[in-house]
Amino acid sequence: MRERKSYQIGDLSELTGVNIETIRYYERIKMVPSPPRTPGGRRVYETTHLRLLAFIRRSRELGFSLDEIRALLRLGGPEKATCREVRQIASRHLDDIRAKLDDLKKLERLLATTIARCSGRMAPDCPVLDILDTERRTARA
């Protein structure tokens, strides 16, 4: 990625992999500072925008929420945050991921067990429908 001093929004989008509308959204919610504009009103992004958007995109790919990314950026962003502060945020995020994985494992077991009980024939008794439709299960009880 060759760095230059200014970028148009399309170039910035291509270089960072962030959709143009998402870049504008990040500006509106103050995740990214609004860039200066040309006399014609076009946004002129700088290298700092490029680095910041790449940081946000990668953080999102790793599953960090916008609030978590905001917290990381408040710490000074990729240039100034201390490892200890970032570690705390990342540790909480890891705990959340592990909790979600536990929930998914439980869901997997429940669904696998239910599917195994399903005969596949046309019948009023369908364990899969029973777990999906609580009223159906209540009416049959």
Image: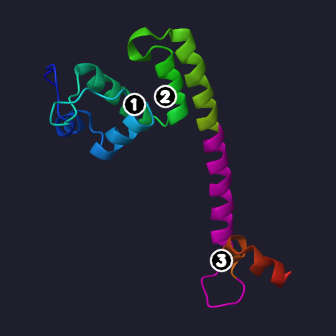
Three-letter amino acid code at the position of disc 2: Ile
Callouts 1 and 3 close, C-beta under 8 Å: no
User: Is residue 110 shown in magenta?
Assistant: yes
Circle 3 Cα neighbour tier, 10 Å, few/some/many (<14 / 14–19 / ≥20):
some
The x, y position of residue 28, in whole percent, is: 41, 38
Circle 2 Cα neighbour tier, 10 Å, few/some/many (<14 / 14–19 / ≥20):
many
Task: Tell me what residue is drawn at x 38 percent, y 29 percent.
Answer: 32
The x, y position of residue 126, in whole percent, is: 68, 81
Residue matched to label 3: 118
The relative height of residue 35 versus residue 98 in the rendered view (above or below) is above
Please name which of the two marks, 1 or 3, marks the residue nearer to the observer: 1
Q: Looking at the image, tell me whether mark 2 or mark 3 is earlier in sequence order.
A: 2
Three-letter amino acid code at the position of disc 1: Ile
Total numbered labels placed on residues in the image:
3
Three-letter amino acid code at the position of disc 3: Cys
| Distance CA(mark 2)–CA(mark 3) | 44 Å
Quadrant in which residue 9 is drawn: top left
Picture disc at residue 56: 1
Q: Secondary structure at mark 2?
A: helix
Q: Looking at the image, tell me whether mark 1 or mark 3 is earlier in sequence order.
A: 1
Give whichever of 105, 59 is nearer the camera. 59
Residue matched to label 2: 69
Q: Is residue 113 left or right of residue 2?
A: right
